[in-house]
Image (cartoon, helix red, strand yellow):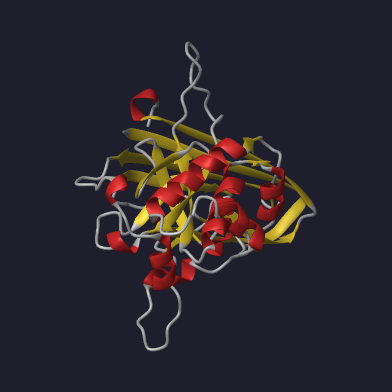
Amino acid sequence: MHLAITHETRYRYSPQVQTAQHVAHLQPSNTPCQTVICHEMQTDPEAVVQHHIDAYLNHRAYWALTHPHDGLQVRAYSEIETTPLTDSPDLNSLSQSWESVREHFRYQGGKPGDLQSGFVFGSHHAPVHAAFLAYAQSSFTAGRALVQAALDLTARMHRDFRYESKSTDINTPALEALQEKRGVCQDFAHILLACLRSLGLPARYVSGYLLTQPPPGQARLVGSDASHAWASVYLPELASHACQGWLDLDPTNDRAGLASPGEDYVRLAVGRDFADVSPLRGVLHGGGSHTLEVAVTVAPLDEVTP
């Protein structure tokens, strides 16, 4: 697919903010399943934007505003080509048990570590907890292949949980969302991460976008989409494959695939949880209250004017 993505964020401050520093994860990276054709980001007020690669190989932008301002607008535009993996193995053929992967990541003195070990431990939004372990265990039976267990857990979450827009926010604990069995994609990704990590398995958070289709006969609404989130579990047996060992799992839509759940997905950034890859965050000096508006449009490139 050839996709065009526009992600606009608007803040209004009252009273004015005197100075501010901001960090953004709004630039997709090239992956085995996607190629970035072009990307641009604009800020209002204008700023000198510095670009870096962070610890998880994401593109990160940084800028400072040193004069008073009563608002901030950030517009990111990307054109992406997505492709399927070539020579991708059949998921049903992958037989490595989840227990063997857990043992692979168990610390042993004198044994070389795995670069993905950091994704085994709990994080702020995806903690290790007995409740997550209890929910996951019916999928992770003794000797079951990790791939089959992870797919079963993803499908079970899709059946058990109710998607309710605005029912939670980023401060809602994953444990609370698990107990209420409702939330949004961000909650479901954090719950899946917490389940996998509570089993001793490495899993990472993925932020990105998903192409949605308008109702039949209706035009696509500009700005009506939202960013998306899902999770990945690490498969050591595929470490040298093009997917680099990662199986992507989207419990919101019960989709899965190596390196990407599908060609209609675009990966933006990866990390331990949302806190590592927040699209926009900052530290403000001044201001008292603010309003926030976010508008995202994901569309086939032939439907938009570049």
Q: In the image, residue 238 lies at what x, y percent?
A: 28, 59
Q: Nearer the viewer, residue 120 or 3?
A: 120
Q: Residue at x 59, y 65 (%)?
A: 123
The outermost residue toward the front is: 142
Q: Farthest residue toward the left?
A: 87
* 260 sits left or right of 168 in the view: left
Q: Quadrant of residue 234?
A: bottom left
Frontmost residue, 134 versus 16 = 134
Which x, y percent locates residue 267? 41, 47
Q: Is residue 171 visible?
A: no
Rendered-image quadrant of the C terminus: top left
Q: Residue at x 47, y 29 (%)?
A: 212
Front-lying residue, 219 or 155: 155
Number of numbered labels in the structure image: 0
Vertical order, 169 against 108 (above or below)? above
Q: Is residue 59 above or below residue 73?
A: below
Residue 76 in picture, x, y percent from top left:
47, 44
Q: Residue at x 25, y 45 (%)?
A: 85
User: Looking at the figure, which quarter contains the N terminus?
Assistant: top left
Q: Residue furthest top?
A: 217
Residue at (65% x, 41% y) in the render: 183
Horizontal side of residue 20 vs 208, given as left or right: right
Of 110 and 77, which appears nearest the observer?
110
Q: Is residue 213 visible?
A: yes
